Every structure is written in C-alpha cells, then in structure tokens.
Amino acid sequence: MLKTVEVSLPDFRNLGVVLRALVVVEGLAFLILLASEAGPAEALAVFIGAGVLREPVLLLVLAALYVLSPRLRRLPYPYGVAAVLTVAGVTGWLGHHAYGHWLALDLKTGDLHAGLVAALAAWGALVYFNWRHRVLSPALAEARLIALQARIRPHFLFNSLNTALGLLRDEPARAERVLENLAELYRALLSEAGALVPLEREVELARAYVEIEAMRLGERLRVTWQCDDDALDALVPPLILQPLLENAVYHGVQPAEAGGEVTVAIALDGDRLDLEVRNPCTATVPPRPGNRMALDNIRERLDLHFDAEAEMRAGPVDGEFVVRIRMPCRHG
C-alpha cells in the first residue's frame, strides 16, 4: 500500500506559510471578539483598535519562528509543536510587555495573559497547517499511482517489452539497456513516498524514460536538453519531470505522423529554479484527453512543498504546449 509522508511543522521561512499564519491568527482574533462583543460593528471597532498592539506582537512572534524554523523542523513533530508553542508564548509575553510599555498604553490584559493568548493562537495555526497537510499529502501517493497506471498501459509496457524482444537477437546490449531503464522506472514508482529529492535523480529518471521511447519511436522523437549543471543538486518533489515528458511524448509527439521535438529546459535564476517542457501542439492533430490529471497532481504537490512560493503554468504557446514550473531552489 502506498503511504503518505508524515506530518511535519510548517516552514516559517516560506512566504505562503507566513501569510497563511497571519490570516489564521487574525481570523481567530476577530471570531473571538465577534463572540464576546454586542455585534459585528463593535467587534470590528475593537479589532481595529487592538491592532496597534496585536500586529507588532504577532509580527515579532513570526520573526522568532522565522529565525528558529530550521532547528524547529529538525525536531520530532510532538516536540516541535511544544517548541513552537513555547516560542510563541514567551515571545508574545515579552513583546506585549516591551511594546505596550514603550507606547505607554493602558493595557487591559497582563503580560502573562498575552503570552497564553499567543501560544493559543500558535496552536490554532498549527491545527490549520496540520489539516492542510493531511488534505494535500495524498497527492504524493497519488503521483505514483498515476505514473504506475501509465506504466502498465499497453502503449508503454507492451511496446517496451516488444522493443526489447526485437533487439534481443541482433543488439542484445540495447535490449538489456531497455530492460534496465524499465526496471529503474518501476523501482522509482514503487519506492516509498519521500519529501524532496535531488533534481539530478529526476533528470536520470526522465532520461531513462526518453531512452525507452526513443528506441520505440526512432527518429520521430527528438529531445533537446538545456540543463544548467549548477541546478542538479536542487531539491524538488519526486516524479515531477518524468510525467511531464510522458505527457509531451504521448500527447504531442506520438499522435503526429512526423513526430516532433520535445525541449526540456532547466535553469537557475538567483534563488529560484525554473523547469520548462515544450512539445508540439498543432491544429491538425486532435488533442488527446488525460494529461490534466498529471498536471493537477504536480500542482498540488508544489503547493504542499512550497506553498505560494511555487507556480506552475501550462497551455499552448505559439504552436507548442508549454509547461513552466518556478519554485524556490533548495539544496540538500
């Protein structure tokens, strides 16, 4: 049975995580006021008025979590939760005391109360992130299921085996290479779902797939690689490149009588990693259904790993179908 990854602490250095935490905490604060005040107008007035102290303390807590995030994420999840609540509580207490007295505010709540509220708000945010992770994490296992289903389709498995059999007598070395590549693909698909893997491993897997299809399609399949070597040690979600190449071959090259060229471009842009896959998309060849499933799955996994810091665009551009992915460049 395919397993999903275990839940982990959010990365408080991720812009999307920070923005979501702000929205969750502010939403909780407003709901509490809405329940305690006479009406929505009174709750909104108190909410805005209290923001002069609440917002700086909240930003101070997030700044502390930003600094400590790498160490917190190395802890086992229960200890990490306890550490986050402690950091939030202590920072909220100190921030409330220092900022409130600096502004000479007539504080209605004590510093200890503010620290407890900060810890409670952090707990609410962690509950939300835990829920969100469990909602999205099945996409990791689903990615392997989608790819595995593609592997067992007759158009790939049987054709790959027939290619190997056709080469066995005259070119046994090439036949052995086909079977080795096929085994490598299955090994990757059946392995446990991990978090992030080196891009170099994804490129190797994609090249193994392309080599199998090239032996079957011959000169009809042409693949151009434009790869920045400095990007190969970047960490990316597993099975992010090979399904894009499979879509390109299955939907772009194979239906065309003359075949076509697939272009794979990988480049670093500062602290960002850019992936691009292009394939023919002509009006004379009717579109084939089914490619949206893999694209939607990749988009979900990018959202799970990188939140708002990753983006993916897919669609026809100047006679080609182009998939562009832009994500933070993380190194292991």
Image (cartoon, rainbow, N blue to C red):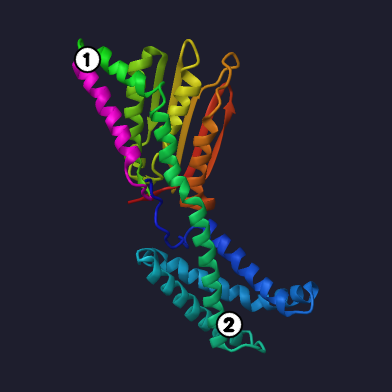
- Closest to the camera, between mark 2 and mark 1, is 1
Badge 1 element: helix
**Residue numbers of the magenta segment:** 172-195
Task: Look at the magenta stretch and give its main secondary structure.
Answer: helix
x and y percentages locating residue 41 in the rendered image: 80, 73
Specify whether residue 182 is painted magenta. yes
Q: Where, by quadrant of the figure, is residue 168 drawn?
A: top left
Report the residue marked by disc 2.
Answer: 99
Q: Nearer the viewer, residue 306 or 159?
A: 159
Q: Is residue 179 left or right of residue 242?
A: left
x and y percentages locating residue 289 in the rendered image: 56, 26
Q: Which mark is residue 90?
A: none
Q: Nearer the viewer, residue 234 or 76?
A: 76
x and y percentages locating residue 321 in the rendered image: 54, 26
Specify whether residue 4 is painted magenta. no
Which residue is pictured at 50% across the width and 14% down the height?
Answer: 256
Q: Residue furthest front?
A: 1
Report the residue marked by disc 1.
Answer: 168
